Protein backbone atom coordinates (compact mmCIF):
# COMPACT_ATOMS: atom_id res chain seq x y z
CA UNK A 1 0.00 0.00 0.00
CA UNK A 2 1.22 3.52 -0.80
CA UNK A 3 2.10 5.54 2.28
CA UNK A 4 1.78 9.26 1.60
CA UNK A 5 4.08 10.21 4.46
CA UNK A 6 7.05 8.22 3.23
CA UNK A 7 9.66 10.61 1.86
CA UNK A 8 10.99 8.74 -1.23
CA UNK A 9 13.96 11.02 -1.83
CA UNK A 10 17.15 10.19 -3.65
CA UNK A 11 20.05 12.63 -3.40
CA UNK A 12 23.01 12.40 -5.75
CA UNK A 13 25.87 13.87 -3.78
CA UNK A 14 29.28 15.12 -4.90
CA UNK A 15 31.68 14.43 -2.04
CA UNK A 16 34.62 16.54 -3.24
CA UNK A 17 38.05 15.02 -3.86
CA UNK A 18 38.50 13.15 -0.60
CA UNK A 19 39.05 15.09 2.58
CA UNK A 20 36.11 16.01 4.74
CA UNK A 21 36.98 19.71 4.84
CA UNK A 22 36.46 19.84 1.07
CA UNK A 23 32.90 18.49 1.30
CA UNK A 24 30.22 21.18 1.16
CA UNK A 25 28.05 21.75 4.23
CA UNK A 26 25.07 20.67 2.14
CA UNK A 27 26.73 17.34 1.26
CA UNK A 28 27.53 16.71 4.94
CA UNK A 29 24.00 17.56 6.05
CA UNK A 30 22.44 15.29 3.39
CA UNK A 31 24.65 12.37 4.45
CA UNK A 32 23.72 13.02 8.08
CA UNK A 33 20.02 12.95 7.22
CA UNK A 34 19.69 9.98 4.88
CA UNK A 35 19.00 6.38 5.95
CA UNK A 36 20.98 4.65 3.23
CA UNK A 37 24.16 5.51 1.30
CA UNK A 38 25.11 3.87 -2.02
CA UNK A 39 28.40 4.26 -3.89
CA UNK A 40 31.48 2.82 -5.50
CA UNK A 41 33.26 0.68 -2.85
CA UNK A 42 36.34 2.96 -2.53
CA UNK A 43 34.16 5.99 -1.77
CA UNK A 44 31.92 4.05 0.58
CA UNK A 45 35.03 3.06 2.57
CA UNK A 46 36.22 6.68 2.68
CA UNK A 47 32.84 7.84 3.93
CA UNK A 48 32.42 5.09 6.52
CA UNK A 49 35.27 6.62 8.52
CA UNK A 50 33.35 9.88 8.92
CA UNK A 51 29.83 8.41 9.15
CA UNK A 52 30.21 4.92 10.66
CA UNK A 53 26.60 4.60 11.79
CA UNK A 54 25.02 4.75 8.31
CA UNK A 55 23.66 1.80 6.37
CA UNK A 56 25.75 1.35 3.20
CA UNK A 57 25.39 -0.40 -0.14
CA UNK A 58 27.78 -0.56 -3.08
CA UNK A 59 28.23 -2.00 -6.56
CA UNK A 60 31.58 -2.37 -8.36
CA UNK A 61 32.91 -0.43 -11.35
CA UNK A 62 30.84 -1.00 -14.52
CA UNK A 63 27.78 -1.73 -12.37
CA UNK A 64 26.77 1.90 -12.27
CA UNK A 65 23.28 1.25 -13.61
CA UNK A 66 22.65 -1.35 -10.89
CA UNK A 67 24.00 1.12 -8.29
CA UNK A 68 21.53 3.80 -9.35
CA UNK A 69 18.68 1.28 -9.54
CA UNK A 70 19.51 0.05 -6.04
CA UNK A 71 19.38 3.62 -4.77
CA UNK A 72 16.10 4.44 -6.53
CA UNK A 73 14.43 1.20 -5.46
CA UNK A 74 15.42 1.75 -1.82
CA UNK A 75 14.07 5.30 -2.07
CA UNK A 76 10.85 3.95 -3.60
CA UNK A 77 10.45 1.79 -0.48
CA UNK A 78 10.41 4.98 1.57
CA UNK A 79 14.02 5.49 2.63
CA UNK A 80 15.96 8.69 2.16
CA UNK A 81 18.91 7.63 0.03
CA UNK A 82 22.17 9.24 -1.09
CA UNK A 83 24.16 8.10 -4.12
CA UNK A 84 27.68 9.33 -3.49
CA UNK A 85 30.21 10.31 -6.16
CA UNK A 86 33.73 11.67 -5.88
CA UNK A 87 34.18 15.30 -6.86
CA UNK A 88 31.00 16.60 -8.44
CA UNK A 89 28.06 14.26 -9.07
CA UNK A 90 27.30 15.82 -12.45
CA UNK A 91 30.85 15.60 -13.85
CA UNK A 92 31.46 12.00 -14.99
CA UNK A 93 29.35 11.06 -11.96
CA UNK A 94 25.98 9.41 -11.35
CA UNK A 95 23.67 12.45 -11.55
CA UNK A 96 22.72 11.98 -15.21
CA UNK A 97 22.14 8.24 -14.91
CA UNK A 98 19.92 8.63 -11.83
CA UNK A 99 17.85 11.27 -13.63
CA UNK A 100 17.53 8.99 -16.68
CA UNK A 101 16.47 5.99 -14.58
CA UNK A 102 14.03 8.08 -12.55
CA UNK A 103 11.40 7.35 -15.24
CA UNK A 104 11.03 3.84 -13.76
CA UNK A 105 10.52 5.27 -10.25
CA UNK A 106 8.24 8.29 -10.84
CA UNK A 107 7.32 8.46 -7.15
CA UNK A 108 10.95 9.19 -6.17
CA UNK A 109 12.16 12.79 -6.00
CA UNK A 110 15.75 13.28 -7.13
CA UNK A 111 17.98 16.11 -5.91
CA UNK A 112 21.55 16.82 -7.06
CA UNK A 113 24.06 18.15 -4.52
CA UNK A 114 27.18 19.68 -6.13
CA UNK A 115 30.76 19.04 -5.03
CA UNK A 116 34.29 20.28 -5.78
CA UNK A 117 35.42 18.52 -8.94
CA UNK A 118 39.01 17.24 -9.41
CA UNK A 119 39.79 19.98 -11.98
CA UNK A 120 39.13 22.59 -9.33
CA UNK A 121 40.75 20.91 -6.32
CA UNK A 122 43.75 19.77 -8.40
CA UNK A 123 44.19 23.25 -9.90
CA UNK A 124 44.46 24.71 -6.40
CA UNK A 125 47.26 22.25 -5.56
CA UNK A 126 49.24 23.22 -8.70
CA UNK A 127 48.62 26.98 -8.47
CA UNK A 128 46.22 28.69 -10.88
CA UNK A 129 46.24 26.80 -14.18
CA UNK A 130 42.57 27.38 -15.02
CA UNK A 131 42.61 31.19 -15.07
CA UNK A 132 41.50 31.27 -18.69
CA UNK A 133 39.18 29.20 -20.90
CA UNK A 134 39.67 25.51 -20.35
CA UNK A 135 38.34 22.19 -21.63
CA UNK A 136 37.80 19.08 -19.52
CA UNK A 137 38.25 15.84 -21.44
CA UNK A 138 37.87 12.31 -20.12
CA UNK A 139 40.25 9.80 -21.66
CA UNK A 140 38.03 6.86 -20.84
CA UNK A 141 36.86 5.15 -24.02
CA UNK A 142 34.44 2.85 -22.21
CA UNK A 143 31.48 5.05 -23.15
CA UNK A 144 33.05 7.37 -25.75
CA UNK A 145 34.74 6.19 -28.96
CA UNK A 146 38.50 6.94 -28.98
CA UNK A 147 38.18 8.81 -32.34
CA UNK A 148 35.88 11.32 -30.67
CA UNK A 149 38.30 11.77 -27.76
CA UNK A 150 41.13 12.39 -30.24
CA UNK A 151 39.06 14.96 -32.09
CA UNK A 152 38.24 16.81 -28.87
CA UNK A 153 41.90 16.78 -27.81
CA UNK A 154 43.01 18.06 -31.22
CA UNK A 155 40.45 20.87 -31.45
CA UNK A 156 40.81 22.01 -27.82
CA UNK A 157 44.56 22.04 -28.30
CA UNK A 158 44.37 24.00 -31.58
CA UNK A 159 42.07 26.52 -29.91
CA UNK A 160 44.73 27.06 -27.19
CA UNK A 161 42.46 25.95 -24.34
CA UNK A 162 44.04 24.90 -21.08
CA UNK A 163 43.13 21.19 -21.03
CA UNK A 164 42.30 19.12 -18.01
CA UNK A 165 42.32 15.34 -18.46
CA UNK A 166 40.26 12.99 -16.31
CA UNK A 167 40.70 9.19 -16.41
CA UNK A 168 44.16 9.57 -17.95
CA UNK A 169 45.05 5.91 -17.63
CA UNK A 170 43.91 2.42 -16.80
CA UNK A 171 45.52 -1.01 -17.15
CA UNK A 172 44.03 -1.44 -20.61
CA UNK A 173 44.93 2.07 -21.71
CA UNK A 174 48.53 2.36 -20.51
CA UNK A 175 49.75 4.39 -23.50
CA UNK A 176 46.76 6.73 -23.89
CA UNK A 177 48.42 9.69 -22.20
CA UNK A 178 51.35 9.37 -24.60
CA UNK A 179 48.92 9.29 -27.55
CA UNK A 180 47.10 12.34 -26.17
CA UNK A 181 50.38 14.23 -25.76
CA UNK A 182 51.33 13.45 -29.36
CA UNK A 183 48.04 14.91 -30.56
CA UNK A 184 48.47 18.04 -28.43
CA UNK A 185 52.09 18.41 -29.59
CA UNK A 186 50.72 18.95 -33.12
CA UNK A 187 49.62 22.42 -32.00
CA UNK A 188 51.24 23.07 -28.59
CA UNK A 189 54.99 23.50 -28.06
CA UNK A 190 57.28 20.95 -26.35
CA UNK A 191 57.82 23.26 -23.38
CA UNK A 192 54.11 23.93 -22.68
CA UNK A 193 53.74 23.95 -18.90
CA UNK A 194 51.80 20.94 -17.59
CA UNK A 195 51.07 19.42 -14.23
CA UNK A 196 49.40 16.48 -12.62
CA UNK A 197 48.01 15.72 -9.19
CA UNK A 198 47.51 12.27 -7.77
CA UNK A 199 45.14 11.44 -4.90
CA UNK A 200 43.97 15.02 -4.47
CA UNK A 201 42.90 15.66 -0.88
CA UNK A 202 43.69 12.08 0.10
CA UNK A 203 46.52 10.33 1.84
CA UNK A 204 49.57 10.21 -0.44
CA UNK A 205 48.67 13.33 -2.47
CA UNK A 206 51.45 14.03 -4.98
CA UNK A 207 51.85 16.84 -7.50
CA UNK A 208 54.29 17.43 -10.32
CA UNK A 209 54.88 20.31 -12.72
CA UNK A 210 56.60 19.42 -16.00
CA UNK A 211 56.72 20.18 -19.73
CA UNK A 212 54.41 18.63 -22.31
CA UNK A 213 57.38 16.72 -23.70
CA UNK A 214 58.07 15.29 -20.23
CA UNK A 215 54.38 14.57 -19.65
CA UNK A 216 54.52 12.31 -22.72
CA UNK A 217 56.86 10.01 -20.77
CA UNK A 218 55.12 10.35 -17.39
CA UNK A 219 53.45 7.40 -15.75
CA UNK A 220 50.13 8.33 -14.24
CA UNK A 221 47.31 6.22 -12.85
CA UNK A 222 43.54 6.47 -12.71
CA UNK A 223 43.67 8.47 -9.47
CA UNK A 224 45.40 11.32 -11.27
CA UNK A 225 44.13 14.50 -12.93
CA UNK A 226 46.36 16.03 -15.61
CA UNK A 227 46.60 19.70 -16.61
CA UNK A 228 48.05 20.97 -19.90
CA UNK A 229 48.63 24.71 -20.00
CA UNK A 230 47.85 27.11 -22.85
CA UNK A 231 50.44 29.30 -24.60
CA UNK A 232 50.31 31.79 -21.70
CA UNK A 233 50.88 29.29 -18.87
CA UNK A 234 54.10 29.77 -16.89
CA UNK A 235 55.82 28.54 -13.76
CA UNK A 236 55.90 31.23 -11.08
CA UNK A 237 57.56 30.47 -7.78
CA UNK A 238 57.08 26.74 -8.32
CA UNK A 239 53.39 27.09 -9.19
CA UNK A 240 51.61 26.59 -12.51
CA UNK A 241 49.99 29.89 -13.49
CA UNK A 242 47.96 30.70 -16.60
CA UNK A 243 48.19 34.43 -17.18
CA UNK A 244 44.89 36.09 -17.78
CA UNK A 245 46.38 39.18 -19.30
CA UNK A 246 46.43 41.67 -16.42
CA UNK A 247 49.10 44.34 -16.91
CA UNK A 248 51.53 44.23 -14.01
N1 LIG B 1 33.04 13.08 -10.47
C1 LIG B 1 34.49 13.16 -10.38
C2 LIG B 1 35.16 12.58 -11.62
C3 LIG B 1 34.99 11.08 -11.78
S1 LIG B 1 35.90 10.46 -13.16
C4 LIG B 1 34.89 14.63 -10.15
O1 LIG B 1 34.06 15.52 -10.36
O2 LIG B 1 36.03 14.87 -9.75
C5 LIG B 1 37.31 9.81 -12.34
C6 LIG B 1 38.54 10.65 -12.63
O3 LIG B 1 38.46 11.87 -11.88
C7 LIG B 1 39.84 10.02 -12.18
O4 LIG B 1 40.36 9.13 -13.15
C8 LIG B 1 40.73 11.24 -12.00
O5 LIG B 1 41.21 11.70 -13.26
C9 LIG B 1 39.74 12.27 -11.47
N2 LIG B 1 39.74 12.33 -9.99
C10 LIG B 1 38.66 12.21 -9.19
N3 LIG B 1 39.00 12.33 -7.89
C11 LIG B 1 40.34 12.53 -7.87
C12 LIG B 1 41.30 12.72 -6.81
N4 LIG B 1 40.93 12.74 -5.53
N5 LIG B 1 42.59 12.90 -7.14
C13 LIG B 1 42.98 12.90 -8.45
N6 LIG B 1 42.13 12.72 -9.48
C14 LIG B 1 40.82 12.53 -9.20
Image: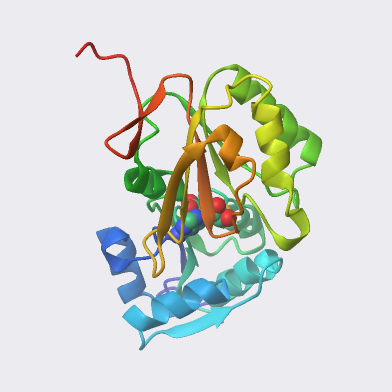
Q: How many marks?
A: 0
Q: Give the residue at the far left of this rendering.
A: 248
**Front-lying residue, 121 or 207:** 207
**Front-lying residue, 185 or 32:** 185
Quadrant containing the N terminus is bottom right
**Which image quadrant is residue 97 in?**
bottom right
Residue 238 visible, this angle: yes
How far across and how far down the image is residue 117, in percent? 43, 49
Identify the residue at image location x=42%, y=20%. 232
Identify the residue at image location x=42%, y=58%. 206
Identify the residue at image location x=66%, y=22%. 155
Q: Is residue 111 left or right of residue 1?
A: left
Q: Is residue 239 above or below residue 158?
A: below
Q: Give the residue at the far top of this rendering.
A: 247
Q: Is residue 137 above or below residue 42?
A: above
Q: Give the residue at the far bottom of this rendering.
A: 53
**Which image quadrant is residue 139 in?**
top right
Residue 93 visible, this angle: no
Quadrant containing the C terminus is top left
How far across and how far down the image is residue 101, in percent? 65, 58
Q: Is residue 173 above or below residue 69?
A: above
How far across and how far down the image is residue 21, in percent? 26, 63
The image's colour scheme reads: rainbow
Identify the residue at image location x=39%, y=70%. 203
Amino acid sequence: MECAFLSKRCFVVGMGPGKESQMTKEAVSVIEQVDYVVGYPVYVELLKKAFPEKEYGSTPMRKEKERCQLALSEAAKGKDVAVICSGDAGIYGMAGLVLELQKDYPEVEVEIVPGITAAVSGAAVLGAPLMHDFAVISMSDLLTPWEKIEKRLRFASEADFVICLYNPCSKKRADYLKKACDIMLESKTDDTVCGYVRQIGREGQEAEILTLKELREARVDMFTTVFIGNSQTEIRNGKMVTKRGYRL
